Amino acid sequence: MSVCTQCLCVRGNALGFSANSPQIYAISYVKLIVTVVKYMPQVHVNYVRKSTMGWSIGQTLLDFAGGVLSITQLIIDSSLQADWSGLTGNPVKFGLGNVSIIFDIIFMTQHYILYRTPRKSIDDDDWQEQQGLLA
């Protein structure tokens, strides 16, 4: 999604859009909504299965680091400019960082605390055969 946004920004200048254009802001809010929605199915699947087996925690740890670094960048930039409106001036970046951190904490809690040992009642092969893709 961010590649599309960047392409739109580059091409948008040629079409008369500026970086502060309402269309660019609308697209960024769509990205925020999509980000919130994309995490929910995995949280639900982990909850239903009571397991995170077959799911890699590595990407979540990197995503968590990215969210922390993004928020840190906003704080450092605002601090250096002595203007804290930088935190609220880019609400989508602030929101994306916080959404990533919140969902990543949920995933880490599921992986390392709640579902540390996989459920023993159903074999992995049987579970995959019994459960539909969206069920």
Image: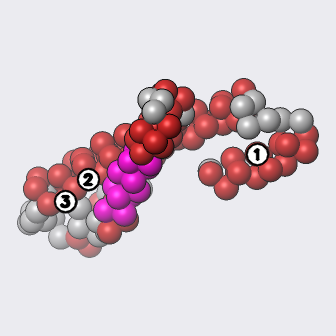
* Observer-nearest of 103 and 124: 103
Q: Which residue is mark 3?
A: 111
Q: Residues within 10 Å of mark 3 (few under 14, many from 20)?
A: many
Residue 112: quarter of image: bottom left
Is residue 28 in view?
Answer: yes
- Principal secondary structure, stretch drawn in magenta: helix
Residue 15 percent across, percent down from the top left: 91, 40
Q: Residue at x 75, y 30 (%)?
A: 21
- Marks 2/3 in contact by CB < 8 Å: the verdict is yes
Going by the numbered disc 2, the residue's amino acid type is Phe
Q: Which amino acid type is shown beneath numbered disc 3?
A: His
Instruction: Tell me how the rendering is colored.
Output: secondary structure
Residue 93 placement (x, y as % from top left): 50, 40
Circle 1: residue type: Cys
Q: Of helix, strand and loop, which one carries label 1?
A: helix
* Residue matched to label 2: 107
Which residue has dot 1 on it? 9
Give me the C-alpha separation between circle 1 and circle 2: 33 Å
Q: Is residue 50 visible?
A: no
Magenta stretch encompasses residue 67? yes
Give how far apart the Cα atoms at labels 1 and 3 are. Answer: 38 Å
- Helix, strand or loop at mark 3: helix
Mark nearer the viewer, 1 or 2: 1
Q: Whole-percent x and y of residue 3? A: 67, 55
| Number of residues whose C-alpha sits closer than 10 Å to that of mark 1, classed few (under 14), some (14–19) or many (20 or more) | some
Between residues 124 and 61, which one lies in front from this camera angle? Answer: 61
- Residue drawn 46% across the image and 37% down it: 78
The percent position of residue 72, horizontal first and vertical second, equals: 38, 48
The extreme right residue here reads: 15
Magenta segment boundaries in residue numbering = 61-73
Label count reads 3
